[in-house]
Image (tube, helix red, strand yellow):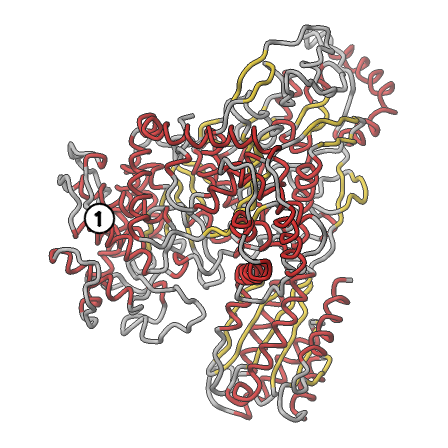
Amino acid sequence: MSKPFPFSAIVAQEDMKKALLMAAVEPLLGGVLIFGDRGTGKSTAVRALAELLPKIETRAGCRFGCEPAHPQDACPICTGKNGERAPKVLKVRTPMVDLPLGATEDRICGALDLEKALIAGEKDFEPGLLAAANRGFLYIDEVNLLEDHLVDLLLDAAASGVNVVEREGLSIRHAARFALVGSGNPEEGDLRPQLLDRFGLAVDVRTIDDLKQRIEVIRRRDAYEADPEAFCESWARKDAAIRNRVVKARKILRDVDIPDDVLTRMSQLCMGLGIDGMRGELTLMRACRASAALGGRADVTWSDVSEISPLVLCHRLRRDPLDDAGSAPRVERAIAAVSAGAGHG
Amino acid sequence: MEPVPDPDRSAAWNDALLAARLLKTGGSQLGGLWLKARAGGVRDAYLEHLQGVFGSQTHWVRVPNSIGHSALQGRIDIPATARTGRLVSTPGLLARADQGVLLLPMGERLDAATAAIIGTAMDRKTSLSPAHGNNRDVPRLNACFKVVALDESASPEEQLPYALSDRLGLIADLSAVSWSDVSGTPPGVYQDTSLTWQDVEISTALAEVLAHVASAAGCSSLRRLRHLTLVSRMLAAMSGSNSVSETEALAALRLCLGVQLQAQTRPEEEQPPEAAGNTASDPCQAPRQQPRSAQSEPEEKDRTGSSQELTELSELLAAVSAGTISGVPELSGKSPARSRNARTGKAGTPQKNARRGRPIAVSRTAPFPDARPNLLATLRAAAPWQVIRSRNRAVLLARLADRDTRSAKQPRALITRDDYRFQRLRHETPSTAIFMVDASGSTALERLGETKGAIEQLLSRCYVRRDEVAMIAFRGRGAETVLPPTRSLVMAKRKLAGLPGGGPTPLVSGLEKGLELALSVRRQGSTPVMVLLTDGRGNIARNGEPDRTRAQEELGLVAGQYRSLEMRSICIDIARRPRESVASLAQTMGADLHFLRHADAGSMSDVVNASLEEARG
């Protein structure tokens, strides 16, 4: 397969790019939902991201994405359960697993290995897509067309970071820490509200209106199709710059500090918008940390919050689904109110 | 048919032939061809021509409409697996179509998920099997193919799923082509020019005009814009020039956007009746002489600032921006594709055979094609028989021994067809609320706004419970399905806001249309709940004539059908004072009667809500 389209060559769609990078920095965010028009580069961006991210270490033949230093019990290869020595450590691309729409539950969670069961009569576990996506990304195009029970399953695994399989006489637990990225077009059917708020970030992508930018998109795409290698080469430096930002952000993420007054105002904001539960606030905090880390700063400022909160909060509002104005203006108003109340910071 | 060649018709045929040639050149770069044509001689001739153009070595893979996802993406080959003792998987249709053509007959019936799978394969040029081939170890199968989607849609509710139509670069409409145009055309053999499209440059000014026309046409997808520039470059290469000129750009607009463009940025707006102009009433058949008619449009200021040689293009642009050219409405992407069988797949599938839901029981027959057997239950069913079967087998083998010399190894488990067990799932039956709204002048003026408010409340409740909603409005001379059954609230809201009012009351047509829709909903296994909002003064007969007595008679007949078909219906009187006519109508229909009091939308929404709850059962 040829190289995917470079991340830095994607024109505009800043919100989407930022959300994806934040998810790459902080896997605990709980996934990104990209909803919007077709042909806006949703899948292109996700695929580009996986190429851009730094490589991860794992052992050859490991199908659970184990870290070499911390092998999982479920993995027969890394633990050396099958009597052999653990194979050598490899550097591989960040896993980027596509979830095809027709996928079954077995395929996602993993199931009894049919081949071994039939031939050798052994009860063995065949890891599924969740295992393959460990420490990487799981991408679902058209997430709104996926069967509901599968979405439940995915979100559950994404939120807990563990996949528990209790079926067909198997009892397996393995890590499934991945950033879930879903995309879709709301006009073909919405996601259930319960599911909506389990995505950490939601981005609404619109098609580019600016004529110049539209032409630029076409030009770059043409250049890419004509010679993918050369095109990627010419963008390699910019991609590397973004990669370095992500690597650096990951390093400083845990040290990013949120001042108390910003935290207070965050809570005020969430209360003012009437957001149920703590998930919104927690995600907002994590997202702001990730955003500050991406900016190379060790402190979260109020401007981070006001920039990030639409991505985090819009889809969590208990909204009248028929309210045409959408939730973005409400969030903006609330931010303005909180900023005004506490003075500028 | 008259053998007189009509210039427009043969133009449509020539365009279609050109599209065939472009598809051959562009291949999977262009995605494929969206062929709008009903079954018939013309279409057959065209497909034959396509086959001729591609040559005999290109293989065609026909995708049956009812295809399961695993057949598309590949699955385990059970006989081969059993024979060889290793897991063998067969490639799906997508992988088999590699380097060939994927033909989708009846594309408008394709369900959205299948279309999305095909679309993903088109993007990625590989096929991803969900059945086998785990993550990064197993190479993906190549699936680089061209798609030819046949679209036979007759009504606006049926259309090619948007996931697919967006990716098909070329459009050919054969609905206006007559047989006489076709018979004269020999299967084309084209000589190749030395130029390829990569050599052709497109000037920024021209590209901007193309982008402008496309976005003015309400077609905002960047994929389509890319196809547009590609096609114009290919056309230039074919004519042996190394830069794109206006003629090619115009041709590309015709081939990629179907030229009859239309501003659809605000779909709530009623199409201005003069949009289709003096040409044809059916927008699908709006002929291709539009560039010419565009010239007659009052010229707008050339806002692109491009040079004068682009006059024709800028006129087209002006006409498009002014919304005076009717287009391929599907292209705007604002009305989503929703094939009728999107959810349940097969008509009349009982819900106990659901693909999702809670597991209820294990059964011997597969609840749906591609169902995976429940392995444990299967083995458990086979276990008690093992001793008997192996004894039987030994006897049989001994009897066959002299005829068949092959040594037969004793398998570990003897499983026969009877042992297979499948998991059954139960899924709650969905219900569909069909609103039939009287938007005539008698009600509209005073209470349409209020009625809309009440419907909105109901919609949001339906949304919470994941019911589907549909809406039919009747006013003027007839009824129309404003909103086919959908779960998308965005659409419902938009359509409702744009619902115009005024005119006489074709109550009969409204009820009739509602009944048709209800029956089709019922066939899909969902329970329809009819909500009729009217003031009961039907004054237009079924044929559109203003004949009050006839309207009354017909009303009785249609309403009687509701009762005999046992449609659950609710009749809501929205007149200022309760009317006798509505009461008697409700009685004939067997409907519950309610009044919408002033400023009391809440209670109406409660009433309908209760009915929907009951319908769920």
Q: Residue B170 at what x, y percent from top left?
A: 33, 48
Q: Which residue position is annotated with label 1? A: B185
Q: Residue at x 49, y 38 (%)?
A: A295
Looking at the rendered image, the quarter that the N terminus of chain A falls into is top left
Q: Check the image and report above or below for B326 versus A302.
A: below
Q: Nearer the viewer, residue B449 or B13?
A: B449
Number of numbered discs overlaid on the protein picture: 1
Q: Check the image and report above or below for B179 versus A259.
A: below
Q: Residue furthest left?
A: B308
Q: Residue B532 at what x, y percent from top left?
A: 63, 78
Identified by mark 1, the residue type is Thr
Q: Quadrant of residue A84?
A: top right
Q: Residue at x 43, y 67 (%)?
A: B267
Residue B439 visible here? yes
Q: Is residue B329 left or right of residue B520?
A: left
Q: Quadrant of residue B26?
A: top left
